[in-house]
Image (cartoon, rainbow, N blue to C red):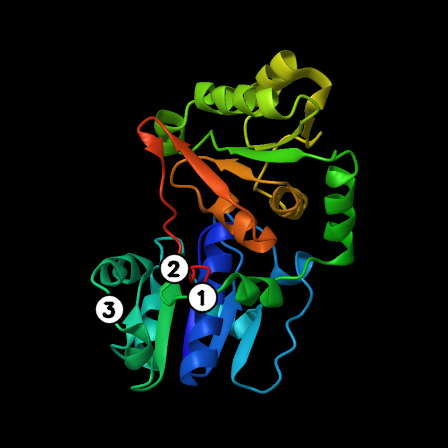
Amino acid sequence: MVTIILEGGLGNRMRAAASAYAMMRQTGVRCRVLWLPQWGMHCRFDSLFLPYASEDEAFELRDADTMEGILYDRPTLRNLHLPRLLQWVRHGGRRLSSPRVLELSRLDFDFATWCQQGDALICSYRDFYEWSPEDLRRLFRPTPQVTQLINARTADFGAYTIGMHIRRTDHELSIQESPIELFMAAIDSELVQHPDMKLFLATDDEATKETMRYRYGLRVITSPNKATRDNTEGIQDALAEMFALSRTAKIYGSANSTFSQIAACLGDISIDILTRHGLGVSNLKVKKRV
């Protein structure tokens, strides 16, 4: 059995879980995928998604229980790095940290073969095995509460509604490489072809909302809530925005942000990642369409 600890934000956790699921299906490696509330994700799995019902015992995706939460907590000064020692006792040297997973991914490391060699632990905020959008949709089904939020966000969608994810606040690369002017240019170009177009805007920046409303008026649809990732309600709202994006005709996304890329996979729609140097490239390990 390999234990996968999901780290990072929503999109990164979802891509890592889909990666583990695809690896299990194609290689038979048993996977236990655990969701722990951590910095940037102060929310439980069951507050966002319906339980995943596995056809057998080869794959688990769930919240960590109390003991697992202690064992697999991120080693920090706060916990005196005790989880690192506990994980070493439990898994020996067969532990891969998130930075190590990133490094090995760039070297095309064979994670599946490594996992088949014995009990292992992988902590990851990225995918390490090629997966499909169907894997993602099978694992992540929003709760009724989140589904209500999604329906509220999409209630005013028109015949042609595009999605935009403009990442700001703590994401320096998106701020530098994907300025708001690029999104405005894309909108203006779309309006030539679709004068009645509507725009669903997902952003973590209130100033961006105001700028878009001022320029494009009532065609802009966006969350009425201020973006926050510090509580369950804020994460639920973010998930609703992700699924709302997945229901648009196409998405324009920010550089190096997984959020909108995952939304495009959920909806099986196209995405243009806007950067100063042209269209960006997705960094997901998603199977190419045939």
Whether pointer 3 and pointer 1 mark residues with C-beta atoms closer than 8 Å, the reply is no
Amino acid type, callout 2: Lys
User: Alpha-carbon neighbours of circle 3 within 10 Å: few (<14), some, or many (≥20)?
Assistant: some
Read off the residue under disc 1: 131
Which of the two marks, 3 or 2, is nearer to us in this view? 2
Q: Quadrant of residue 134?
A: bottom right
Query: Which mark identifies residue 109?
Result: 3
Read off the residue under disc 2: 285
**Relative to 35, residue 147 above or below:** above
Residue extending furthest top? 214
What separation in Å lies between label 3 and label 2 (alpha carbons)? 13 Å
Residue 111: where, in percent of width, then height? 30, 73
Residue 44: where, in percent of width, then height? 61, 58
Answer left or right for 98 relative to 35.
left
Closer to the chain start, of discs 3 and 1, is: 3
Which of the two marks, 3 or 1, is nearer to us in this view? 1
Answer left or right for 167 relative to 142.
left
Answer left or right for 121 relative to 55.
left
Nearest to the observer: residue 171 or residue 135: 135
Residue 148: where, in percent of width, then height? 79, 48
Nearest to the observer: residue 230 or residue 277: 277
Whether pointer 1 and pointer 2 mark residues with C-beta atoms closer than 8 Å, the reply is yes
Residue at (36% x, 50% y) in the render: 283
Residue at (47% x, 29% y) in the render: 168
**Relative to 127, residue 242 above or below:** above
* Element type at mark 3: loop
Amino acid type, callout 1: Trp
